[in-house]
Image (spheres, rainbow, N blue to C red):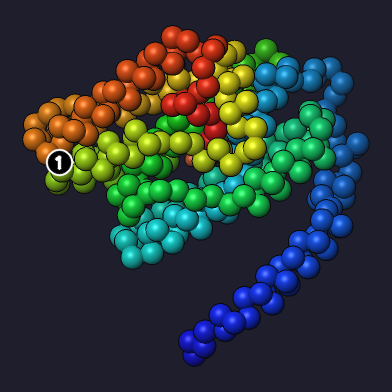
Amino acid sequence: MSDVPLLPSLEPEVARLLARHNEASARIDWSYREFLPLEALHAPSDTPPLSDLAYTAVETALLTEANLPWYTAVLHEGLRDSLAPLQEFVRVWTSEEDQHSTLLETYLLLTDNGDHAERGRRRKAVLASGWSHQLEGAFEAMVYTTIQELATQVFYICTARVCEPDDPTLARALRRIAKDETRHYAFYRDVVKAHLDADPAYVIPLVNVLVEFQMPGRVMSDFDERSRMLASEGVFGPEQYHNEVVEVACSFWNVDDLASALPEARVALTRLNRYRAMLRRLAKHRSASPAVGGRSGVG
Ligand SMILES: [Fe+2]
Ligand SMILES: [Fe+2]
């Protein structure tokens, strides 16, 4: 194929075609659920509906997982010129992540939990928002995905605990997903570790990513509200994020020792310690504070 560019002068026309498509889509707005014989598949009536808290946690996980096409697009683009095994990992990772939203959505459908049409609208809104980040380069992407996978793993374990009394089968499914997240975490974490071993100066961009971290689920319009609820009910918030994510990763990577031994990393270390102190304060006042560090969500 020859490289024939599109005409910049035609941008308004393309914008008009996009508006036409959006209008037509809004008029149709169908959902695949309408075509499934769900009545025949509903679980026996002795399965109680999930509590509001359990449903919110599961739906938050689902809506974050559902945005997978954008995570894949961003990673694929960001790693285009990087190491070949990383590019292959992203394809494998995508195939594994794809199961997560499918499992959660199917569970909620078959057990008739929540408002399916409303959930479908929220899912579309999330995907229409896309996903972007401020990361610079492949190393920062590796640090980001490490933290995101670990936070996700912890989130699933916490959610499984909340769901256990309502439905142990769901709790088992959530723990199964958490195992995938653990394997993803281990891969990204060890890519980062290998770079730190080769050159401790990598600790500086690592800290920058840590203190700026935000979960990808942020594109949900009510994400802060969900985070506050899940934190105040003790499901997942700054406390879990600090103790089970930030401290675990920092300790594995030996961040404190690496940064203290490197004069040019002192500013970064001070910033990191300030950030950890802020998380600890938030954890203490979790019911009154938004979940700044422990942004719930998964991927
Ligand atoms: Fe994952
Ligand atoms: Fe996932």
* Up-down relation of residue 198 to residue 50 (above or below): below
Q: Residue 14 location in percent, x, y?
A: 67, 74
Q: Identify the residue at horizontal 51%, vertical 54% (top origin).
A: 72
User: What's the amino acid at mark 1?
Assistant: Pro
Q: Residue furthest top?
A: 284
Left or right position of 172 against 42: left
* Up-down relation of residue 33 to residue 9 (above or below): above
Left or right position of 52 against 246: right
Q: Quadrant location of residue 220? A: top right
Q: Identify the residue at horizontal 49%, vertical 36% (top origin).
A: 215
Q: Residue 111 location in percent, x, y?
A: 79, 29
* Up-down relation of residue 101 to residue 152 (above or below): below
Relative depth, front residue between 244 and 16: 16
Relative depth, front residue between 40 and 82: 82
Q: Evaluate whether residue 66 shows in this view.
A: yes
Local packing at callout 1 (Cα closer than 10 Å; few below 14, some 14-19, many 20+) is some
Relative depth, front residue between 102 and 13: 13
Q: Identify the residue at horizontal 55%, vertical 11% (top origin).
A: 287
Left or right position of 79 against 175: left
Q: Identify the residue at horizontal 21%, vertical 27% (top origin).
A: 270
* Up-down relation of residue 162 to residue 261 (above or below): above
Find disc 1 in the rendering and name its residue. 200
Q: Quadrant location of residue 175? A: top right
Q: Residue 213 location in percent, x, y?
A: 40, 36
Left or right position of 224 against 237: right
